[in-house]
Image (tube, helix red, strand yellow):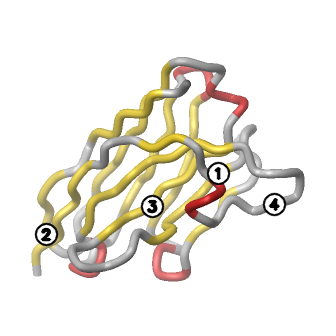
Amino acid sequence: QVQLVESGGGFVQTGGSLRLSCAASGRTFSAYAMGWFRQAPGKEREFVAAISRSGGRTYYVDSAKGRFTISRDNAKNTMYLHMNSLKPEDTAVYYCAAGTPGLGVRPLLLNDYDYWGQGTQVTVSS
């Protein structure tokens, strides 16, 4: 089992920045690809960003490219999402997730992940 705990969410104004963290425990962190998803009220949970086991490959939803940066520190069992130039459309509960996708598979889908955190709220005011 893997336990994931998000932190770093909060309330910011348009154009502001936040850094989300996801701390993992229970198993070897480096064995998992990691991702961030978000869910706004009344909407489906959507992919935001993902990072490979070693951190060598990253993926982003189009709306986040150039604004968000995903990273991981395997020595600290922690993943991060640096969010800049935040917009009201970014308002959502953000979830971190861990998974073991197959070789060559980009971990972009909900079903690519086996473990989920409880979520952290990000609110961007206009």
Q: Quadrant of residue 104?
A: bottom right
Between disc 1 and disc 2, the foreground one is: 1
Tag 4: amino acid: Val
State the mark number for residue 51: 1
Q: Which residue is mark 4?
A: 105
List x then y, in percent, for residue 77: 54, 25
Mark 2 or mark 1, which is nearer the start of the sequence?
2
State the mark number for residue 78: none
* Contact between labelled residues 1 and 4, with CB atoms less than 8 Å apart: no
Left or right: residue 92 versus residue 126 is right
Mark 4 or mark 3, which is nearer the start of the sequence?
3
Tag 1: amino acid: Ile
Mark 4 or mark 2, which is nearer the start of the sequence?
2
Q: Which residue is mark 2?
A: 13
Q: CA distance from mark 2 to mark 4?
A: 36 Å
Q: CA distance from mark 1 to mark 2?
A: 27 Å
Q: Which residue is mark 3?
A: 37
Q: CA distance from mark 2 to mark 3?
A: 21 Å
Tag 3: amino acid: Phe
| Circle 3 SS class | strand
Q: Quadrant of residue 100?
A: top right
Q: Quadrant of residue 72?
A: top right
Q: CA distance from mark 3 to mark 4?
A: 17 Å
Between disc 2 and disc 3, the foreground one is: 3
Q: Residue at x 55, y 52 (%)?
A: 35
List x then y, in percent, for residue 105: 81, 60
Q: CA distance from mark 4 to mark 1?
A: 12 Å
Up-down relation of residue 20 to residue 24 (above or below): below
